[in-house]
Image (cartoon, rainbow, N blue to C red):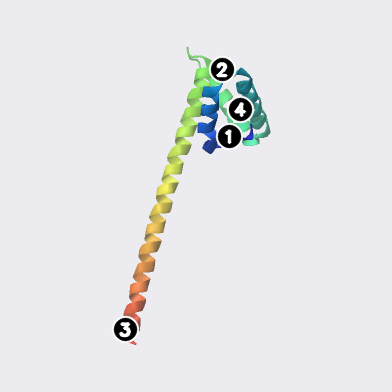
């Protein structure tokens, strides 16, 4: 059950589910482990509290569960966008660093030729 949060194991878990004729027991165990993880995470508890406060302030024809899922998706998309931006920034900084190192190497070769 400790593998359910590891993305590398997701395909293995899906295969295991597809092989089972009755997956109820496994689903219940997974839900129990996920619930335990949520209870232990103070950061996640704060986030879920924020989502509940946002949903409770809305007057909407939609179910609260749908609205909570919507807020979760918004936050996850923002996180993914920030991750992509960070990855691009890191790649850009590495490119600049490689260019600087090449330039310094060429400058050093030029200086050594003068000596």
In the rendered image, residue 82, in percent from the top left (x then y), is placed at: 45, 42
* Label 1 CA crowd tier, 10 Å (few <14, some 14–19, many 20+): few
Q: Is residue 28 left or right of residue 65?
A: right
Residue depicted at 60% across the width and 35% down the height:
3
Q: Nearer the viewer, mark 3 or mark 1?
A: 1
* Label 4 CA crowd tier, 10 Å (few <14, some 14–19, many 20+): few
Tell which circle, 3 or 1, labels the residue nearer the N-terminal end.
1
Q: Nearer the viewer, mark 2 or mark 4?
A: 2
Tell which circle, 1 or 4, labels the residue nearer the N-terminal end.
1
The alpha-carbon separation of the residues under discs 3 and 2 comes to 76 Å
Q: Is residue 45 left or right of residue 92?
A: right
The residue wearing badge 3 is: 113
* Label 2 CA crowd tier, 10 Å (few <14, some 14–19, many 20+): few
The alpha-carbon separation of the residues under discs 3 and 1 comes to 58 Å
Tell which circle, 4 or 3, labels the residue nearer the N-terminal end.
4
The residue wearing badge 4 is: 49
Residue 5's disc is 1
Instruction: Classify 2 as above or below 99.
Output: above
The alpha-carbon separation of the residues under discs 1 and 4 comes to 22 Å
The alpha-carbon separation of the residues under discs 2 and 4 comes to 37 Å
Tell which circle, 2 or 4, labels the residue nearer the N-terminal end.
2
Callout 2 touching callout 4 (CB < 8 Å):
no
Q: Nearer the viewer, mark 1 or mark 2?
A: 2
Q: Nearer the viewer, residue 101 or 19?
A: 19
In the rendered image, residue 111, in percent from the top left (x then y), is placed at: 34, 81
């Amino acid at each position: 059950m400790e593998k359910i949060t590891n993305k590398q194991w997701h395909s293995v878990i899906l295969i295991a589910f597809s092989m089972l004729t009755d997956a109820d027991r496994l689903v219940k165990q997974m839900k129990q482990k996920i619930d335990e993880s949520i209870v232990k995470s103070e950061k996640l508890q704060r986030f879920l509290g924020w989502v509940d406060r946002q949903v409770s302030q809305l007057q909407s024809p939609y179910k609260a569960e749908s609205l909570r899922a919507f807020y979760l998706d918004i936050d996850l998309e923002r996180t993914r966008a920030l991750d992509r931006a960070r990855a691009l920034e890191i790649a850009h900084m590495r490119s600049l660093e490689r260019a600087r190192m090449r330039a310094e190497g060429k400058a050093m070769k030029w200086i050594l030729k003068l000596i």
